[in-house]
Amino acid sequence: MISVSILGIKEDKKNNYKKIDNTNCDYIHLDIMDGIFVKNKVDYNEEYLFKKKLDIHLMVEDVKSYIEKYKKLNPQYITFHLEVKQNINELINLIKDNNIKVGISIKPNTNINEIIPYLSLIDLVLVMSVEPGKGGQEFIESSIYKINELKRIKEEKNFNYLIEVDGGINKDTINKVKNADIKVVGSYITNSLDYEEKIDILKKAN
């Protein structure tokens, strides 16, 4: 499955969002940043109401307040970072209480063992294959091991989470992450003149 990150779209947003909404992508990926957890600050102020299912990635410290804000968009997933200095179980329950599926993301330098205690409780694991905070970075190869290990654990324990990967995914790197269920793709699609064509290339390559 392909989730399109709209982070790189800076001009004519409504028109370009509509174009993406009319492609055959599976999700729209909203990157939300607070300028604290990561250097950049990005909010989504409902410039366009997507028909596609939303996959919201919170790169923020105050996760609770952002859950309250973005639950109004009725997303399928809200994902927060394992590295936040908060009670992880409490955040999982808060998202579930709003009838939204829960994702946890891990940065490239975070050991996969740190997320294992939560795998039975969540619906999605987001492996960052770049440092979170800005688009257009190169794919970090060590992410492949994490994805493959998460798949092994999932099958061994009969867990239900999906594996998502985000960062540096394009037609050349998508084959490296075949064990990820959802591939988040940004600049490869949004920097092109034909979004549908790029999505089709990715789906065929995978």
Image (cartoon, helix red, strand yellow):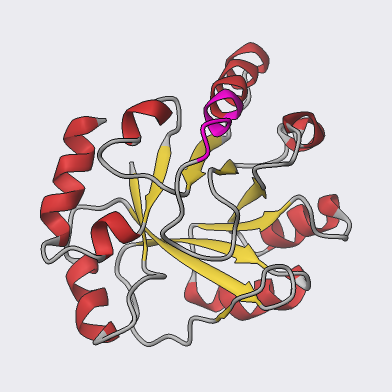
Q: From the image, which quarter does the N terminus lie in?
A: top left
Magenta stretch contains residue 184: no
Image coordinates of residue 83 in percent, x first then y, are 78, 53
- The furthest residue to the front: 138
Image vertical order of residue 108 relative to residue 188, above or below: above
Looking at the image, which is closer to me, 7 or 180?
7
Q: Residue at x 28, y 36 (%)?
A: 172
How many discs appear?
0
Q: Nearer the viewer, residue 100 or 175?
A: 175
Tell me which segment is drawn in magenta.
Answer: 140-146
Left or right of 71? Residue 16 is left
Q: Is residue 78 left or right of residue 138?
A: right
Figure check: 186 above or below 184: below
Q: Magenta span has 144?
A: yes
For the point 35% across and 79% down, the residue is 49
Give the image location of residue 202, x and y in percent.
23, 41
Given residues 40 and 161, the one toward you in this image is 40
**For the point 59% across and 58% down, which residue is it?**
132
Residue 153 sits in which quadrant?
Answer: top right
The C terminus lies in quadrant: top left
Point 53% across, 43% down: residue: 129
| Image x and y of residue 141, in percent | 51, 32
What is the quadrant of residue 78 in the picture?
Answer: bottom right
